[in-house]
Image (cartoon, rainbow, N blue to C red):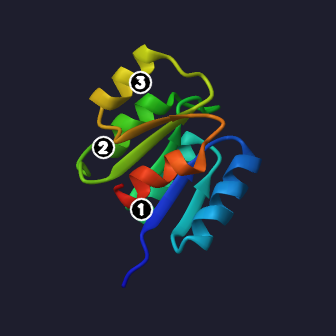
């Protein structure tokens, strides 16, 4: 069976490393990006099934990246993560097509749900 691919886009190196280690151990193929620009580029070359995307990135708003990633690829599951949790942003992210919105610090049990569909 083919491994599911996950792209993580976040500007926190330590978060990328810990999520990459956890997800790799769970059998996912993982690719990481530290900026929106790098994330969009890796999305095109890596072809992930799931994207874990931070709202606040150094070069672009995560909601703009969400819209860009959803164009023509509506089947892609995009999980929004953020340290700055507010209801308006949550609603906007869901309207734009995010499948889940998870506040930081990330609860691994909460992250497992959208990854496994449970």
Q: How crowded is mark 2: few (under 14 residues within 10 Å), some or many (20 or more)?
A: some
Which mark is nearer the camera, 1 or 3? 3
Answer with left or right where residue 21 lies relative to residue 93. right
Residue 40 shows in the view: no
Residue underneath mark 3: 90
Q: Nearer the viewer, residue 60 or 97?
A: 97
Q: What element carries label 3?
A: helix
Answer with left or right where residue 41 lies relative to residue 84. left
Q: Residue 114 carries which label?
A: none
In three-dimensional space, the C-alpha distance between marks 2 and 3, rounded to whole angstroms, equals 16 Å
Q: Residue at position x 24%, y 48% from top?
A: 74
Residue underneath mark 1: 48
Q: Quadrant of residue 87?
A: top left
- Pick whichever of labels 1 and 2 is earlier in the sequence: 1
Which mark is nearer the camera, 2 or 3? 3
Q: Is residue 49 above or below residue 51?
A: below
- Pick whichever of labels 2 and 3 is earlier in the sequence: 2
């Amino acid at each position: 069976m083919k491994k599911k691919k996950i792209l993580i886009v976040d500007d926190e190196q330590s978060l990328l490393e810990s999520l990459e280690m956890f997800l790799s151990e769970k059998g996912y193929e993982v690719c990481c990006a530290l900026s929106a620009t790098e994330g969009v580029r890796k999305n095109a070359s890596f072809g992930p099934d799931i994207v874990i995307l931070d709202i606040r990135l150094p070069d672009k708003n995560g909601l703009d990246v969400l819209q860009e990633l959803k164009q023509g690829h509506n089947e892609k599951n995009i999980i929004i993560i953020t340290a700055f949790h507010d209801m308006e942003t949550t609603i906007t992210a869901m309207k734009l097509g995010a499948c889940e919105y998870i506040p930081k610090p990330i609860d691994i049990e909460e992250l497992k749900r959208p990854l496994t569909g449970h």
